[in-house]
Image (spheres, grey):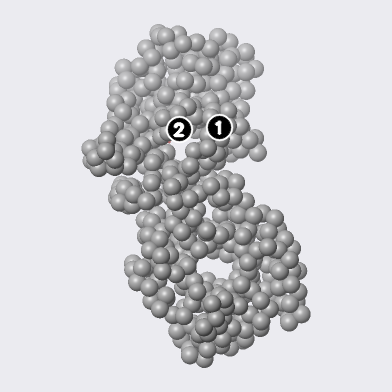
């Protein structure tokens, strides 16, 4: 069973002892004592540290990472080895030592090997030896060969940690772990935002352990996720080989709310699935390489993705080039935000792919619900749309299908004219936005979005009280425009409704079941209010 290991990186023994307590109570199965972070220590304080660690039902790795492998140790090698020998006598369960340094010196091999009894016949060594290799620049091309070479050494566990410059590096790392774990306990991690999947899916691949930080800001390597997020947000304990994988593809994706929404939804419906942030570099080739890589790995069981900036057009192109299904309206809008994948089975040859746009459906449902009516009540409604970007395009398509009379007003007139031409609407100049008296105002610009919350697209608010004001920004929940509209007595609809609706539509496309909307709403509101 893959364990969660929290590295302790405090600079004093006292702080490390305090952190130990916190790690154990936050759900760590193991801790890694990073001795190279300690500024001061002596025999007595190290003994105290190990005695404290023994109070918890967690295993201990002792490491003194050398600087050229990403550690802080800059002293001489013999002092480092002596420190590990001394700590080894105090009873950690594992010693981690660098493969390169191990190979460098027969003397070192003998000393570390003795502590770990790697050459003895004992079936239960006092301390197990982890041989590790790190690359903070890149992921080497032949990970399986490197792991095989490491396994030739007398060690109990092999570990690789390499920077992922592309998410496909993380896929290669997961492959290497799956293969190597058949022969020897293996740890394989991809560092950086693109490598996050290797940390969360370690359990799906049978890795010996994965590292999680004590808290945000306390990482010992880039991309480590706080242990509390591993346990609660990513539901670490429920991940197994059969767990389906979903995620949000974007660049960047670190701040997306979607993992919180979907993982909570999967938990609420007892669906064996995990939803991940998938950082894919912007070019089409990067997008295609990632989806190709996922499809080539049936064990991964990628079932669907939310697709966001800058990949919405890439998704359409990929599905089109691979003969998949494109929802007709997504094709007309020219952007899709949802990928549905079905693995090959009797009914689908070889893999089925489909692209949808749930933005327009999310917006239309929010609008219809907000006006308390039916889709038919939108027929012939006069709608003024502010903005002509991606969100406007999806909403204008939906409004057009509902039979609205649409006027589009955008700072850049040519974009308004193009959008109007595509959907039989009228374009007006940005200056004329104050002269209009629509039944519905749809706000699709980024004006008023956090952090510029004091801005509104309408400096003076002259709309009549009968106008319904629909805002697409959800951060903040109450934009300045909505406050102006509320003060006038207009009915208002905030951006959270559209955001939740489009997520709920994705959930239905992926699982065939209704989304737990109340769970989604709670997650969004808690996050936004927080
Ligand atoms: P989205 O996908 O969310 O629609 P987008 O495609 O970047 O994002 O579109 C942003 C919209 O906000 C555009 O209509 C943009 O106007 P331009 O087409 O002229 O760029 C509009 N917008 C952003 N900042 C604005 C500002 N300060 N004043 C007026 N319009 C603005």
Q: Is 404 drawn above or below residue 89 in the view shown?
A: above
Nearest to the observer: residue 370 or residue 49: 49
* Ligand 1 lies under 8 Å from the Cβ of mark 2: no
Residue 13 figure quarter: bottom right
Q: What is the C-alpha distance between the residues marked 2 and 1? A: 11 Å
Q: Is 62 drawn above or below residue 512 in the view shown?
A: below
Residue 27 figure quarter: bottom right
CA neighbours of label 2 inside 10 A, class few (<14), some (14 to 19), many (20+): many
Nearest to the observer: residue 203 or residue 72: 203
Left or right relative to 391: residue 469: right
Give the mark nearest the N terminus, 2 or 1: 2
At x 44% / y 57%, what residue is drawn? 205
Location of residue 172 in the rendering, given as x and y in whole percent from the top left corner: 37, 60
* Kind of element beneath mark 1: helix
At x 58% / y 39%, what residue is drawn? 451
CA neighbours of label 1 inside 10 A, class few (<14), some (14 to 19), many (20+): many
Location of residue 180 in the rendering, given as x and y in whole percent from the top left corner: 40, 66
Residue pointed to by mark 2: 507
Which residue sits furthest bottom?
107
Residue pointed to by mark 1: 520
Residue 384 figure quarter: top left
Can residue 372 be seen here?
yes
At x 76% / y 80%, what residue is drawn? 44
At x 50% / y 49%, what residue is drawn? 239
Left or right relative to 97: residue 150: left
Can residue 528 be seen here?
no
Nearest to the observer: residue 146 or residue 331: 146
- Contact, CB < 8 Å: mark 2 with mark 1? yes
Location of residue 364 in the rendering, given as x and y in whole percent from the top left corner: 44, 20
Left or right relative to 27: residue 192: left
* Kind of element beneath mark 2: helix
């Amino acid at each position: 069973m893959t364990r969660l290991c929290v590295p302790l990186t405090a600079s004093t023994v006292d702080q490390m002892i305090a952190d130990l307590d916190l790690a154990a109570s936050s759900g760590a199965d193991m801790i890694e004592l990073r001795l190279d972070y300690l500024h001061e220590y002596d025999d007595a304080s190290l003994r105290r540290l190990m005695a404290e660690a023994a109070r918890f039902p967690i295993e201990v790795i002792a490491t003194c990472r050398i600087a050229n492998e990403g550690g802080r140790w800059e002293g001489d090698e013999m002092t480092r080895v002596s420190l590990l020998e001394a700590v080894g006598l105090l009873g950690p369960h594992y010693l981690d030592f660098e493969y390169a340094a191990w190979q460098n010196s027969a003397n070192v091999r003998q000393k570390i090997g003795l502590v770990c009894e790697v050459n003895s016949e004992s079936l239960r060594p006092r301390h197990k030896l982890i041989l590790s290799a790190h690359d903070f620049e890149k992921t080497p091309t032949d990970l399986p060969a490197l792991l095989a070479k490491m396994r030739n050494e007398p060690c109990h566990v092999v570990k690789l940690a390499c920077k992922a410059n592309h998410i496909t590096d993380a896929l290669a790392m997961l492959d290497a772990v799956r293969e190597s774990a058949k022969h020897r306990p293996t740890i394989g991690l991809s560092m950086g935002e693109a490598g996050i999947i290797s940390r969360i899916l370690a359990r799906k691949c049978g890795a010996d352990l994965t590292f999680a930080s004590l808290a945000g800001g306390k990482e010992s390597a880039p991309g480590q996720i706080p242990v509390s997020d591993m346990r609660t947000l990513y539901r670490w304990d429920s991940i197994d080989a059969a767990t389906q994988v979903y995620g949000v593809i974007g660049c960047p994706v670190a701040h997306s709310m979607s993992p919180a929404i979907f993982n909570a939804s999967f938990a609420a419906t007892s669906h064996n699935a995990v939803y991940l942030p998938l950082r894919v570099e912007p070019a089409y080739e990067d997008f295609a390489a990632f989806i190709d890589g996922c499809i080539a790995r049936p064990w991964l069981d990628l079932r669907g993705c939310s697709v966001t900036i800058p990949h919405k057009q890439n998704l359409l192109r990929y599905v089109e080039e691979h003969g998949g299904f494109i929802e007709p309206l997504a094709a007309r809008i020219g952007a899709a935000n949802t990928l549905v994948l079905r693995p090959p089975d009797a009914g689908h040859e070889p893999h089925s792919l489909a692209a949808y746009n749930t933005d327009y459906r999310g917006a239309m449902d929010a609008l219809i619900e907000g006006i308390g009516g039916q889709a038919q009540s939108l027929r012939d409604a006069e709608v003024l749309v502010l903005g002509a970007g991606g969100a406007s395009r999806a909403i204008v398509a939906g409004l057009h299908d509902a039979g609205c009379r649409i006027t589009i007003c955008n700072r850049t007139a040519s974009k308004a004219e193009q959008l109007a031409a595509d959907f039989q609407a009228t374009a007006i100049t940005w200056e004329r936005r104050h002269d209009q008296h629509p039944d519905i105002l749809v706000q699709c610009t980024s004006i008023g979005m956090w952090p510029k919350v004091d801005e509104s697209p309408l400096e003076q608010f002259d709309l009549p009280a009968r106008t319904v004001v629909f805002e697409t920004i959800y951060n903040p929940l109450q934009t300045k425009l909505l406050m102006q509209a509320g003060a006038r007595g207009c009915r208002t609809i905030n951006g959270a409704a559209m955001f939740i609706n489009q997520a709920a539509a994705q959930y239905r496309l992926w699982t065939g079941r209704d989304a737990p909307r109340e769970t989604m709403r709670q997650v969004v509101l808690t996050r936004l209010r927080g």
